[in-house]
Image (spheres, rainbow, N blue to C red):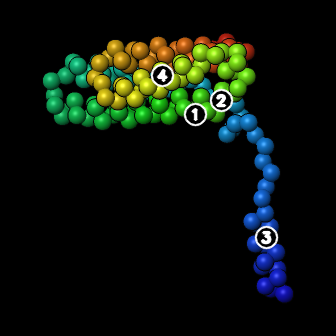
Amino acid sequence: MVLSRLLSIIDQVRAPLDVYAHCDLPCGVYDPAQARIEAESVKSIAEKYQDSDDEVFKERALFIKEERAELCKHHLWVLWTDYFKPEHLKQYPELHELFWNATKLAGESKHSVDPGVGQKLLDAISEIDKIFWETKGEKKAA
């Protein structure tokens, strides 16, 4: 009796559940601002790196810049893979190339101390941001 009840409970726990969703969380959580904030940090750190003669500071700046660049890349990939859908790609066929370039720039910025690379990354995110808000049918949040 106890064994049969235990097996019944195990079967209920192991039973597959049907779950339907088109994204990880309600779509209101996605925003290119997360990637932009990290990219702004990347650019700012590169500028501070260029202005410093302190080797300890520069080493720390490189470490933090690489972390921020990786986070930027992560936020871009989440936006690309979780928010944008096939219908968006039909409407904006340039999306694939925009994300390709932006994530490549995020990767490049990990290895560069040129603030210009950070600016190119910000420019790429700005293009994605414009399309993002158009797909939401809203004006960009202030």
Marks 1/4: CA–CA distance: 13 Å
Q: Quadrant of the C terminus?
A: top right
Marks 2/4: CA–CA distance: 16 Å
**Label 4–label 3 contact, CB within 8 A:** no
Q: Earlier in the sequence, mark 1 or mark 4?
A: 1
**Amino acid at pointer 3:** Asp
Q: Earlier in the sequence, mark 2 or mark 3?
A: 3
Name the residue carrying label 4: 102
Name the residue carrying label 3: 11
**Residue closer to the observer: 85 or 35:** 85
Q: Secondary structure at mark 3?
A: helix
**Amino acid at pointer 2:** Tyr
Name the residue carrying label 2: 83
Rendered residue at 28%/23% (across/down): 113
The answer to whether 139 is drawn above or below residue 73 in the figure is above
Farthest residue in the right direction? Answer: 1
Q: Secondary structure at mark 4?
A: helix
